[in-house]
Image (cartoon, helix red, strand yellow):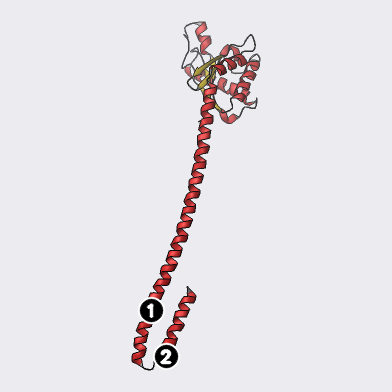
Amino acid sequence: MRNQFTFLVLATSVSLSACSDNSEKSAAMEDITTDTVQQTEAIIEEKAATLKETVTEKVDAASAQVAEITEQAKTSIDEQVESVQTDAQKLVSTETVDKVTEMVNKTSTSVVKVERDGDKLNLIMPGNLTFPTAGSTLKADSHEVLDSVALVLGEFDKTVISVAGYTDNQGSEAYNQALSEQRANSVAAYLKGKKINPARFEILGFGERNPVADNGTASGRNQNRRVELTLIPKK
């Protein structure tokens, strides 16, 4: 474009030099100015059209790239959602419940109860199996059961593990709350030691809340003293 303007200036100078008097120069100057303006406008329009075409091409290319990336992301998300749904269905299938029940009850002393709850799987361990009375240190007899539980957690590795401790209503509410938390932490710590990812755990203590049996009987209190592990599909 700069060369075109240089040519116009030189052409103007040559045309003016050829004129013999001022009136001719004035008329020539007017004609040249009009031609120069028209040619300049034509050059600008040409450059603008070229620039517009270039910008349009780049915008179209960028839009196509964004659309492709969006589609790839959508496909990836859909695949992940489908995988999670499949895992959730597998987790609560009858076959899985039966398999897990068998895995965690290999010994004659094992009485771990396995239940479905929507898309979750609950493993309920009675307190007399895992802890001494009023204690939060795991019994040696519970290790074999927890080893089996760890195998289950390892197989269903796309889950969050909620570990919840419960007590009966004997003793103060504050004491029972602390004891339930300590017991839940003891179970979680043992399972973490079996190479279960610590980030998967959610540790809770409910004290004497949420009883599953009558605290007015020894049998009922025994059922209420428990630790529940809930496997929750990751969202």
Q: Residue at (59%, 21%) from the top-left corner? A: 187
Q: Residues within 10 Å of mark 2 (few under 14, many from 20)?
A: few
Residue 65 lies, in percent from the top left, at 50, 49
Q: Quadrant of residue 18?
A: bottom left
Q: Quadrant of residue 26?
A: bottom left
Depth check: give the residue in front, 102 or 139: 102
Asked if disc 1 and disc 2 are in contact, CB closer than 8 Å, the reply is no
Q: Earlier in the sequence, mark 1 or mark 2?
A: 2
Residue 40 lies, in percent from the top left, at 41, 74
**Element assignment for label 1:** helix
Farthest residue, direction bottom = 20
Residue 29 lies, in percent from the top left, at 37, 85
Residue 98 lies, in percent from the top left, at 57, 15
Q: Residue at (60%, 12%) from the top-left corner? A: 129
Depth check: give the residue in front, 179 or 85: 85
On the question of residue 126 being in view, the answer is no
Tag 1: amino acid:
Asp
Above or below — where is 189 with respect to 208?
Answer: below
Q: Residue at (54%, 30%) from the top-left corner? A: 83
Total marks placed: 2
Marks 1 and 2 sit apart, C-alpha to C-alpha, by 17 Å
Provide the residue designation for mark 1.
35
Q: Residues within 10 Å of mark 1 (few under 14, many from 20)?
A: some
Q: Residue at (52%, 23%) from the top-left corner? A: 89
Provide the residue designation for mark 2.
18
Above or below — where is 168 with respect to 57?
Answer: above
